[in-house]
Every structure is written in structure tokens, then in C-alpha cells.
Amino acid sequence: MRLFGKRKISLNAAPPLLQTLRLVLRGFDPSDAVDVLARAQGEAAGAMASAPPCQSHEESRRTVEGFIRGGSTWAVVEKRSGHVIGAVALGPDSGRAVEGALELGYTLGEQYRDQGYAVEACGAVLAYAFDELDSPVVGAGHELTNQRSRRVFKKLGFTCEGTMRCARTLSGGGYADEIRYSLLREEYRPAPK
Ligand SMILES: CC(C)(COP(=O)(O)OP(=O)(O)OC[C@H]1O[C@@H](n2cnc3c(N)ncnc32)[C@H](O)[C@@H]1OP(=O)(O)O)[C@@H](O)C(=O)NCCC(=O)NCCS
């Protein structure tokens, strides 16, 4: 368990409720396995999506259990439909020396992309990371071909740090390079409401 920041919040506790204009971000519930299987996944292309999409209710149930146990993963709920459409996670960024460095990961169901939801959801989690947890820096990364994620990080104000080679283990074996990013607390600008 890591405790840091001005309010000494544990990253392993259930994530707090966050709201944006169109989304609610809340902790996962076991009953979310249905939505995770049906809506909140798609082509795997990034840090949170390095495992292949769930193929069965049982796999999806285990995935949701992992999110709940991990404690720092939000279910992204579309207010309009009430469905879980994706996930955003904050974890310790073990690649950085500074205390309280965090890593952001996220994924959205395929039918919910291209609506600005990724930027909206990640913006709320960044506000929590900097304003509530008092993290000095949030890191993130995407695979070389993931142009959609590149645009998300750019819109959120991240700085590209370059390519980390053999950054991640692939579920099918081998390693993938990753483009790495970071956003310092002093660089963070909340999105206009
Ligand atoms: C990466 C991923 C989350 C991006 O999702 P996304 O919906 O494309 O991201 P955004 O929130 O930036 O929305 C994209 C587009 O929605 C459009 N959009 C439509 N309505 C909008 C609105 N009301 N407000 C803002 N943007 C809107 C924007 O024009 C934007 O396009 P742009 O990038 O050309 O500006 C998604 O592709 C995904 O889940 N991929 C698989 C997993 C993955 O790669 N995860 C990331 C790991 S690093």
C-alpha cells in the first residue's frame, strides 16, 4: 500500500466517485461484468488493454474482480445510458524515483470512441491525482501504433519523453516498445468546465 500526498490517501482504497458533464466514474461492482463483456472493450492497443478482450462472462468476471481488488480502477459510466463503457486506472509509476509518481491507463469500448469520452474521463482522474493525491507527476504510455492515444495525451497536456524499448510484456509472448509521456503537477491545467 502506498500512502502519499497532502491528504494521505491510499491508492488501494476503493476509488472515489468522480463526475464530469457526461460521465460518472466510480469503483467497479461485480455486476459490471456484464457490461465489461458486452460494451467496455474492443481492439487491444494499450497499457490497460495489453491483455486480449474477454471472451466469456467468466473471463469478464475475473477482470472485474481484479479491478475491485486492485482498488484504483474506475468504471466509466455513460450518464445517458447508465452503461459501463470503459475503465481508467491510476497506479504507482515504478519507473520514476520521485515519491507519489503515478501511472495513468485507460480503455473505452469500441462503440464509445470518437466522442471525446477518453479525454473527459482521464481529465477527471488527473484532477484527482494532482488536487487530491498531490502527486508530483503522472506518467503514461502507448504502443507505437496507437495514434488515438497519442492524441488523447496531447489534448491532456502530456509531454512526450520518447520511446522506451521492451517496455511491456505481450500476452502472447515477447515485448513491446512504448512511447512514454508525463505530466508534471505544475504543468497541469484543468479543462474548462
Ligand atoms: C485510446 C482511446 C481510449 C481513445 O478514445 P477516443 O474516444 O478516440 O478519444 P477522445 O476522447 O480523444 O475522443 C476522440 C475524438 O472524439 C471527437 N469528439 C466527438 N464528440 C466530442 C465531444 N463532445 N467532445 C470532445 N471530443 C469529441 C473528437 O473530435 C476527438 O477527435 P480528435 O482526437 O481528432 O480531436 C480508445 O481508442 C481506446 O480505448 N483504445 C483501445 C485501448 C487503448 O488504446 N487504451 C489506451 C492505452 S494507452
Image (tube, grey):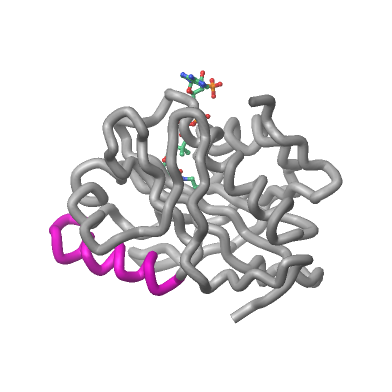
Q: Quadrant of residue 100?
A: bottom right
Depth order, front residue of 164/27: 27
- Residue 66 is covered by the magenta coloring: yes
Q: Position of residue 188 (x, y in %)?
A: 77, 41
Q: Residue at x 58, y 48 (%)?
A: 125
Q: Residue at x 19, y 44 (%)?
A: 38
Quadrant housing the C terminus: top right
How many numbered marks, from 0 up? 0
- Residue 19 is covered by the magenta coloring: no
Q: Position of residue 66 (x, y in %)?
A: 35, 70
Q: Position of residue 45 (x, y in %)?
A: 42, 46
Q: Is residue 170 above or below residue 141?
A: below
Quadrant housing the N terminus: bottom right
- Magenta part of the protein: which range? 54-70
State left or right for residue 31 relative to residue 161.
left
State left or right for residue 67 relative to residue 165.
left
Q: Quadrant of residue 96?
A: bottom right
Seen as rendered, the residue at the extreme bottom is 1
Depth order, front residue of 70/82: 82
Depth order, front residue of 29/163: 29
State left or right for residue 172 relative to residue 62.
right
Q: Is residue 136 above or below residue 8?
A: above
Q: Position of residue 151 (x, y in %)?
A: 59, 31
Q: Residue at x 15, y 65 (%)?
A: 58
